Amino acid sequence: MNGPDVVVIGAGPAGLTAAYELVKNGRMPLVLESADKVGGLARTEVYRGYRFDIGGHRFYTKVDEVQRLWEEVMGADFMTVPRLSRIYYQGRYFQYPLELFNALTNMGPVESIRIMSSYVRARLSPRGEEHTFEQWVTHRFGRRLYKMFFQAYTEKVWGIPCNKIHAEWAAQRIKGLSLRTTLMNAAFQTNTSKSLIREFQYPTHGPGMMWERFSERVEGLGGEVKLNTEVVGFVRSGTRISGVVTRRDGKTETISGEHIISSMPIDELILKIDPPPPAAVTEAARQLKHRDFILVGLIINQPVLFPDNWIYVHSPGVRVGRIQNYKNWSAAMVADARKSNLGMEYFCSVGDDLWTMSDEELIALARRDLEALGLGMAEDIEDGFVIRQPKAYPVYDQVYRSHLEVIQGYLCTLENLQTIGRNGMHRYNNQDHSMLTGIKAARNLMGEQHDLWNVNTERSYYEEFASS
């Protein structure tokens, strides 16, 4: 039962940042990761020498301490990438961020007038209650723009109607943007909104490179990162977690630790505690929902396909939700400069028709979708592979907040456990916000006092029309 001072669960951005902050201050953590590589959702998968993100991961932050960490760890391997992305809607591509001439040309004068009329009506009408994503967006943009640029894509991502998604999701992800500022940005090509980012930083070999470097730093300074190690239980002694039960290579081991920092899904954590929490807490954990994700990676026998880093697909006519063009993130992502590699992203739920398709069926679907969008020819697709990622996104349904509050209340009674990161807090954090929770959790063990649940309550930014 003898173990390290701090056990960190999960070697994603939050967990590795916590571990790095600890080792820099003389603490020797043990990091436990169930996968065979570090990075979590921000890892980079390699297939035939081609590199694929699990979703696109830009490195952009307004948190100075996070920026300094990125630069400290990556050095010259941290490049600046111009951002180009578009929205595909009704057979047309809209520049994103919005460019006025492009938008007016695609919409036409009649539709543009209808959008402005809808917006004016929404602004002049009493705002009323804002419990749902639909209400929040419609009140600020008008119903017509909501239908065009919010509803289809949002429902594709989350798999539930917008009137079943909590308004908190919109408030967190598209805070600070209005149609007026969008039009001003479009007309004068300025960037007054913090959501509209025209360039970002990126490791030359993908985001996984960042977390591989973090892992190397942790171990170089005396910490330990154990891969292929699943946490299967927590031993609770009163108000403390006295043991972490792990399984590795078929063997079970209980590791003690003075302190536990966990980035594993918070619902799984609750259900693995023994003796279990009160019934109301375990039931709340069972009620939290996640959205899952499938990446179909394609290798295409064409050197250039389209100029975007990624494209949001709002059309309900195809199943794909977003397309990543990795070569446009970094030329080093391709093994052969004469070819391209794409990530066709499908949002789904474990057990649904997409999740249960065979790899061959999913690759065939990706071929059809790519051709239907006019982005490539099926005969040019040389090869493909599939990655299924469970629990990619915490779902903000209408009841999640009440369940999460029950869980938070219980976690406050466990004096040596902190939860961090996107899944560890069931919060749609950006990568830098997840890192910030890791930094602050580590500093709490050094005598500082930070409320981790306040991270990302006033720091939100990024995509407004199509965040995922």
Image: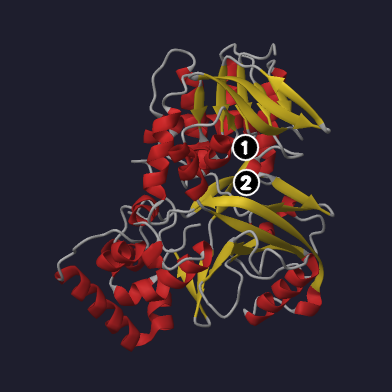
* Residue 196 visible here: yes
Asked if 181 appears above or below 62 in the picture, the reply is below
Q: How many marks overall?
A: 2
Q: Badges 1 and 2: C-beta atoms under 8 Å apart?
A: yes
Left or right of 338 on screen, residue 5: left
The amino acid pointed to by label 1 is Gly
Residue drawn at x 40%, y 66% is 162
Callout 2: SS = helix
Foreground pick, 394 / 110: 394
User: Which residue, given by chain and number where applicable, does mark 1 sit on?
Assistant: 12
Left or right of 195 on screen, residue 290: right
Residue 415, given in percent of the width and then of the height, sits at: 46, 19
Asked if 337 appears above or below 377 in the picture, the reply is above
Residue drawn at x 77%, y 39% is 36
Residue drawn at x 60%, y 60% is 349
Foreground pick, 355 / 223: 355
Residue drawn at x 29%, y 68% is 138
User: Which residue, given by chain and number where applicable, does mark 2 sit on?
Assistant: 41
Residue 382, given in percent of the width and then of the height, sits at: 83, 69
Q: Residues within 10 Å of mark 1 (few under 14, many from 20)?
A: many
Q: Quadrant of residue 375?
A: bottom right
| Residue 132's disc number | none
Residue 446, given in percent of the width and then of the height, sits at: 48, 13
Q: Residues within 10 Å of mark 2 (few under 14, many from 20)?
A: many
